């Protein structure tokens, strides 16, 4: 099911979770500023993950920031949080105001073009807590974002605009996978920031 005509109070999921899409919350000028600043000033590194016993270095780049030197392990790789930059703190405070939720960390992903994607997964690591809220902020190229129920296989998809905010909360990570599919026609970068509450 592809969704259009969003309302931030509307739950995009039919059951077993809650996802709200706020649409674009920045001006065009702000979008361009934050995209360029993040491209130039974040400590990007290629992700190194273990899949089916093989170590793989992704083209996609990542960075992990937080209130403390949190050690975050996923896909058999561990990252230690860097200190917030001034701009990341600005964005965190703004997202906290929009969502009425406090976050203490942020995982950033840089997709250079539409060939770079993220397969089906859920952010259900114990370090993130159970039924936690994850606020996803996007800058740059518009990309399709999909969710799939873990047992019923029903899917929900939408296009994430530059400067847009999407929030996953409640039992979403328990019951739904999500992914960023390949879009070969996209030839410009997208940066995704996921603000989280890390349980140290």
Image: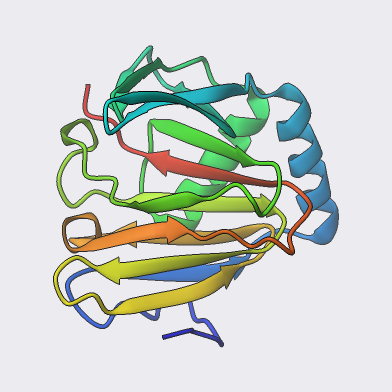
Residue drawn 43% across the image and 17% down it? 81
Judging depth in this view, the residue of 109 and 22 nearest the camera is 109
Within the image, what quadrant is residue 11 found in? bottom left
Judging depth in this view, the residue of 25 and 163 nearest the camera is 163
Vertical position of residue 183 compared to residue 53: above or below: below
Locate residue 64 relative to residue 5 in the image: left or right: left
Judging depth in this view, the residue of 146 and 164 nearest the camera is 146
Q: Is residue 93 visible?
A: no
Instruction: Give the image location of residue 130, x and y in percent.
Output: 14, 46
Locate residue 5 relative to residue 70 in the image: left or right: right
Judging depth in this view, the residue of 167 and 147 nearest the camera is 147
Locate residue 34 relative to residue 15 in the image: left or right: right
Q: Is residue 96 visible?
A: yes
User: Can you say which quadrant of the picture contains the N terminus?
Assistant: bottom left
Locate residue 41 relative to residue 76 in the image: left or right: right
Residue drawn 85% across the image and 53% down it? 29
Within the image, what quadrant is residue 177 found in? bottom left
Residue drawn 49% across the image and 65% down it? 145
| Image coloring type | rainbow
């Amino acid at each position: 099911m592809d969704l259009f005509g969003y309302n931030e109070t509307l739950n995009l999921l039919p059951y077993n979770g809650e996802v709200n899409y706020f649409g674009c919350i920045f001006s065009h000028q702000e979008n361009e500023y934050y995209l360029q600043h993040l491209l130039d000033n974040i400590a990007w590194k290629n992700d190194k993950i273990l899949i089916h016993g093989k170590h793989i270095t992704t083209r996609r780049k990542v960075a992990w920031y937080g209130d403390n030197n949190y050690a975050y392990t996923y896909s058999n790789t561990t990252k230690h949080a860097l200190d917030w930059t001034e701009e990341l703190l600005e964005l965190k405070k703004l997202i906290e105001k929009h969502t009425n939720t406090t976050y203490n960390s942020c995982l950033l992903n840089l997709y250079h073009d539409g060939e770079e994607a993220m397969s089906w997964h859920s952010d259900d690591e114990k370090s993130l807590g159970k039924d936690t809220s994850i606020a996803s902020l996007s800058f740059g190229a518009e990309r399709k974002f999909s969710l799939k129920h873990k047992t019923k296989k029903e899917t929900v998809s939408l296009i994430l605009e530059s400067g847009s905010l999407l929030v996953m909360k409640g039992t979403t990570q328990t019951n739904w996978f999500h992914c960023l599919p390949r879009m070969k026609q996209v030839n410009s970068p997208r940066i995704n920031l996921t603000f989280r509450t890390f349980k140290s």
